[in-house]
Image: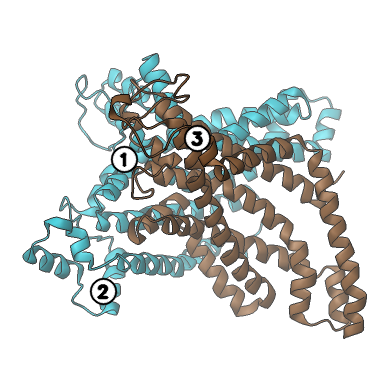
Chain colours: A brown, B cyan
Amino acid sequence: MTTAEATFGPATEDQAVGLWRDAFRRMRRSPAAIIGGTIVIVFVLMAIFAPFLAPFDPTRGNLADSYLPPSAEHWFGTNVQGQDVFSRIVFGSRLTLGIAVLSVAIGVSIGAFFGALAGYFRGWVDSVIMRGVDIMLAIPGLLFAIVVVSFLGRGVVQIAIAIAVVNVPIFARLLRGSLLGLREADYVVAARSVGVGGPTILLKHMLPNAVGPLIVQATLALATAVVDAAALGFLGLGPPDPSTPEWGTMLSDTYRYLNQAVWLAFFPGIAIVLSVLGFNLLGDGLREALDPRLRR
Amino acid sequence: MGKFILRRLLLLIPILLGLTAIVFVLARMLPGDPASAILGERATPQGLARVREALGLDQPLWVQYWEYISGFARLDLGESFITNRNVTDDFLQRFPATIELAIAAMTFALILGIPLGLLTAKRRGTWVDQVGNVVSLVGISIPIFFLGLMLKWAFAIQFPILPDSGRIDLIEYSIPRVTNFMTIDAALAGEWGGMVDALRHLVLPGIALGTIPLAIIMRITRASVVDVLNEDYVRTAYAKGLPQSDVDSRHVLRNAMLPVVTVIGLQTGLLLGGAILTETIFGWAGVGKWIYDAVVNSDYQVIQSGVMLLALIFILVNLIVDVSYAFLNPRIRYA
């Protein structure tokens, strides 16, 4: 047993490193991945260094300054309460992106766990899990999120769970599919035939080779999660304290004053579009870099 | 085929049972007593008792669940605690407005998406393809509510050439409601001006709701056409001297449309979710606005029942798409 692992372990290790290095090289040549990656990094830095970037306190406003159009002092104008829109967008990136990351993390963990169970054990475990997946996929995503938030409450964690619930079945199905496809792969059959144990095969040989599509899907899911988080905010299901800056919440109600203060809708909307575009471009670039079939 | 449809229908039963269970459990997770959560600060002891009795909260849980699913099976979904109106009646009255909007969105998406997908596939690798790729990426990345707000600002406020909300000009036209499809009702009443007005009201919300499906259909059509263009029979068709347009319509598009049909089915979920946002922005009196109002008013009965009805429709549409897919593609045999 130990000899078998000694023979197979390093071989796959080498291949795994090679695959990732190769993928990274190809990603650097893909303009989509570079543009997307840059946009994502800019937004992440914005979230981290928000207190240094924002010229004003995002929660403090002066009613005398309400509805100021964009100017040298207030780059993106001010809102009803006289709060600086630019500062609110900078700070809003923390909550909107934070919810998106948290929800995808929850979705991937739970989804991948059940997907691995289904793909590895097959049989009745697979049937039960896949019927559960069917049920969850039967409710349109945003609708499901709305129901979950309106019943569980509007905290950040509840919102992240609501969006994660939509992702769980997608990741479960994806990983299960990859694992089923890998069961008959030559190196898996070889490992099995020399007596490598089941859990070792799953963790060391199958999962590393199934993780690529998962990463791609997770990146694309971040794009959807940003839109869903903002949509919940827009519908008034965002964080309960309205002074908390969140991109979607900033857009809600703006349709009432579009004719007098269009910047209130425009700038937060552009922030959402750019970040979503960034995740989508990065996801597409990653897909091309990680999918061996697209290799040139 | 009959067997296939029957089996798919039987598979719906466990899915619907699972759905009712999830919604039932969620509804019981409301913090505190559901009755006081429903009535809020206006609660009186009599009111609380009435709501508890109406909800059957004095019964054991399994009785409550049984009441709930047997009600659902009869499509009797109770009454709104805010408006006291029958939930199923309200849904049926509003649903045509949402279908009308969804049809407008899908028409927009298909009319532009399929030709653009075909064009970018045939010019793949050129600047046309790259521009198309950027357009579809941006289309996928724009949230419906932002696009809706910007369309409304541009075409109803800055350049007021289209109406900004509602389904028809209610001051100008009074149309008797027959089908609740505004365009059809106007036509039935012989109000041609009203029908044109109803169509004009569909333009902005239709574009807002149809842009994501447009981008997706464009991408799928492109990918699918690229696959078909590499097929031997397409080369043969060109080789035997068929004109371009004949090859496109008879050999390329017909074979490339199968994946597109599936995607159209999957879009239904997006359209139903997106309808909530679109209808809110454009004051469209459909199911989406109804659910939004229920969320705002914490009308839990409407939320839980409305979502079940929409999920049911989503499941049925996907069933129809699966069946039509099998019907369209003779290469697929369902056991």
Q: Are marks 3 and 1 on the same chain?
A: no
Left or right for B200, reference B75? right
The first of marks 1 and 2 along the sequence is 2
Q: Are marks 3 and 2 on the same chain?
A: no
Residue A7 x/y as whole percent = 93, 76
Helix, strand or loop under label 1: loop
Mark 1–mark 2 Cα distance, whole angstroms, equals 30 Å
The dot on residue B110 is none
Residue at horizontal 28 percent and vertical 29 percent from the top:
A63
Q: Are marks 1 and 2 on the same chain?
A: yes
Residue A271 drawn above or below residue B94: above
Chain containing the residue with disc 1: B
Helix, strand or loop under label 2: helix
Q: Amino acid at mark 1?
A: Gly
The dot on residue A54 is 3
Left or right for A208, reference A263? right
Write down the quadrant of residue B240 in the picture: top right
Q: Is residue A132 visible?
A: yes
Image quadrant holding the N terminus of chain B, namely bottom right
Chain containing the residue with disc 3: A
Helix, strand or loop under label 3: loop
Write down the quadrant of residue A78 in the picture: top left
Task: Give the residue pinned by disc 2.
Answer: B64
Q: Is A235 in front, or is B273?
A: A235
Q: Amino acid at mark 2?
A: Gln
Task: Give the residue pinned by disc 1.
Answer: B286
